[in-house]
Amino acid sequence: SRATRENLVIVTANARDFRALVAKEAIHPGMILIPSTSRERSKRLILSAIDYLVEQGDPEDLMVNHVLEVDVSAEDAPQFSIYPLPAGGEE
């Protein structure tokens, strides 16, 4: 995919299609999943996700072969979870 060739993290609300896409790659630059929402809220969630990654360490290292999922089910600040994709891909 273009994202893999150009080392670009995918940011999407379309988890199903993009999970299948990156799961086929041996190495991918990562994916950030946000809920489907307004453009303005999406922008705020993406910026929050980037801040979270920076707090955790080097975002480039953290995201390789991983997904950062943004959960907004709680009414307060978004919750973040990082997991490998494909599953079992961690060293």
Image (spheres, helix red, strand yellow):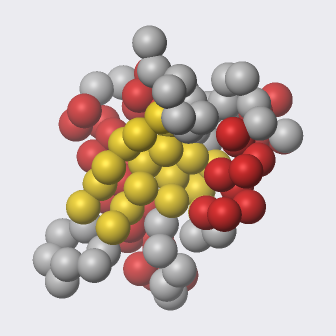
- Is 23 situated left or right of 13 in this image? right
Q: Quadrant of the N terminus?
A: top right
Q: Residue at x 59, y 35 (%)?
A: 86
Q: Residue furthest bottom?
A: 38
* Quarter of the image where one finds residue 41: bottom left
Q: Considering only vertical position in the picture, is 7 above or below 14?
A: above
- For the question of whether residue 51 can be seen, the reply is no
Q: Residue at x 36, y 53 (%)?
A: 49
Q: Considering only vertical position in the picture, is 61 above or below 69?
A: above
**Image location (x, y in percent) of residue 82:** 37, 42
Q: Residue at x 73, y 50 (%)?
A: 20
How many labels, in total? 0
* Quarter of the image where one finds residue 8: top right
Q: Residue furthest top?
A: 91
- Is 11 situated left or right of 17 in this image? left
**Image location (x, y in percent) of residue 25:** 75, 31
Q: Quadrant of the C terminus?
A: top left
Q: Considering only vertical position in the picture, is 43 above or below 4?
A: below
- Is 2 situated left or right of 50 in this image? right
Residue sitting nearer the eye, 54 or 62: 62
**Image location (x, y in percent) of residue 65:** 56, 30
Q: Residue at x 48, y 34 (%)?
A: 84
- Is 39 situated left or right of 26 in this image? left
Q: Residue furthest front?
A: 88
